């Protein structure tokens, strides 16, 4: 009997077994709804975007290392400044925060997982897709060049004729949707899934910071989403929300953006 089992083991090619194991492991990470694994995915995504933003910062510093440097032309420098700020604020800081939230909050409040595990995974993949889409602008016609705040009229078609700002508006809408989903999920988790006896006043400090941060996300991200949609309409459909010559108001973008940005 033992001899038969040994011969069967020798008959199976080891490469095939290892291949199946690797494939299963990859699919497990792609399809996981486990908050601990999603925390690791957020951490990896944050590291990826921090690396991209850091590379952009190095290129900016090389340009600034001496006066009259010709390492970068003016257009490329504007694109790097825009993408560095956008990457660090929207794609670098956010996933690290959500990595900590996913890893710690269910354990701190005595819950088995977050309130909506599938939405938790959906929020991560939506965020990641939006961030990748934004960075694809580098190889698909030029990156956004209007600054990380994309102030109008600099970000309108009149002054930014390439598709870079289009990648900015659509990519951040998608990534922001993932962040909004995550904020709603953690609010629901902390409100409804605390262990018996854990009142709000007994919650750990980090649970409180997550609760407040998620509430801020809930109220702040819809504002930037509205602004991005209006700017998209201006650029794609010829709307006039921010076009001064057609009766629009560029200061409206600043109000909308900083309703999001200050919180």
Image (tube, grey):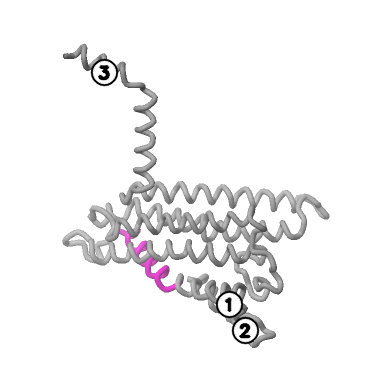
Between the C-alphas of marks 3 and 2, the distance is 76 Å
The reply to whether the magenta stretch includes residue 215 is yes
x, y percent for residue 103: 34, 50
SS of the residue under disc 1: helix
Badge 2: how crowded within 10 Å, few (<14), some, or many (20+)?
Answer: some
- CB under 8 Å between discs 1 and 2: no
Tell me the tag on residue 120. none
> What residue is shown at x 38% (from left), y 50% (from top)?
39
Quarter holding the N terminus?
top left
x, y percent for residue 65: 76, 50
> What residue is shown at x 35% (from left), y 48% (from top)?
31
Instruction: Tell me the magenta residue range.
Output: 204-220
Left/right of residue 213 with respect to residue 57 in the rendered view? left
Tell me the tag on residue 253. 1
Residue 239: image quadrant is bottom right
Task: Give the foreground label among 3 and 1.
Answer: 3
Return the residue found at the far top.
3
Residue 249: image quadrant is bottom right
x, y percent for residue 47: 50, 47
Look at the picture and state if 157 lies above or below 133: below
The reply to whether the magenta stretch includes residue 3 is no
Left/right of residue 90 with respect to residue 211 in the rendered view? right
Question: Considering only order in the chain, which callout, 2 or 3, is on the residue closer to the N terminus?
Answer: 3
Between the C-alphas of marks 3 and 1, the distance is 69 Å
SS of the residue under disc 2: loop
Question: Considering only order in the chain, which callout, 1 or 3, is on the residue closer to the N terminus?
Answer: 3
Left/right of residue 160 with respect to residue 171 in the rendered view? right
Tell me the tag on residue 8. 3
Task: Give the foreground label among 3 and 2.
Answer: 3
x, y percent for residue 197: 17, 62
């Amino acid at each position: 009997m033992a001899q038969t089992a040994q011969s069967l083991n020798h008959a199976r090619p080891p490469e095939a077994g290892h291949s199946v194991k690797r494939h299963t492991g990859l699919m497990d990470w792609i399809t996981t709804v486990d908050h601990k694994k999603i925390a690791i995915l957020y951490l990896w995504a944050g590291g990826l975007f921090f690396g991209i933003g850091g590379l952009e910062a190095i290129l900016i510093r090389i340009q600034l290392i001496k006066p009259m440097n010709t390492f970068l032309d003016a257009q490329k420098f504007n694109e790097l400044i825009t993408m560095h700020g956008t990457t660090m604020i929207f794609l670098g800081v956010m996933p690290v925060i959500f990595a900590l939230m996913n890893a710690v909050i269910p354990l701190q409040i005595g819950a088995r997982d977050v309130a909506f595990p599938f939405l938790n995974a959906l929020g991560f993949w939506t965020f990641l897709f939006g961030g990748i889409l934004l960075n694809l602008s580098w190889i698909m016609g030029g990156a956004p060049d209007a600054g990380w705040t994309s102030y109008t009229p600099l970000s309108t078609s009149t002054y930014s004729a390439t598709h870079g700002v289009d990648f900015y508006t659509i990519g951040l809408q998608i990534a922001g949707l993932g962040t909004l989903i995550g904020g709603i999920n953690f609010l629901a988790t902390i409100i409804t899934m605390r262990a018996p006896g854990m009142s709000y006043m007994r919650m750990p400090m980090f649970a409180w910071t997550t609760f407040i941060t998620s509430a801020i996300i809930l109220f702040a991200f819809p504002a930037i989403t509205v602004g991005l949609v209006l700017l998209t309409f201006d650029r794609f459909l010829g709307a006039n929300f921010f076009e001064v010559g057609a009766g629009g108001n560029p200061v409206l973008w600043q109000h909308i953006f900083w309703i999001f940005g200050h919180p």
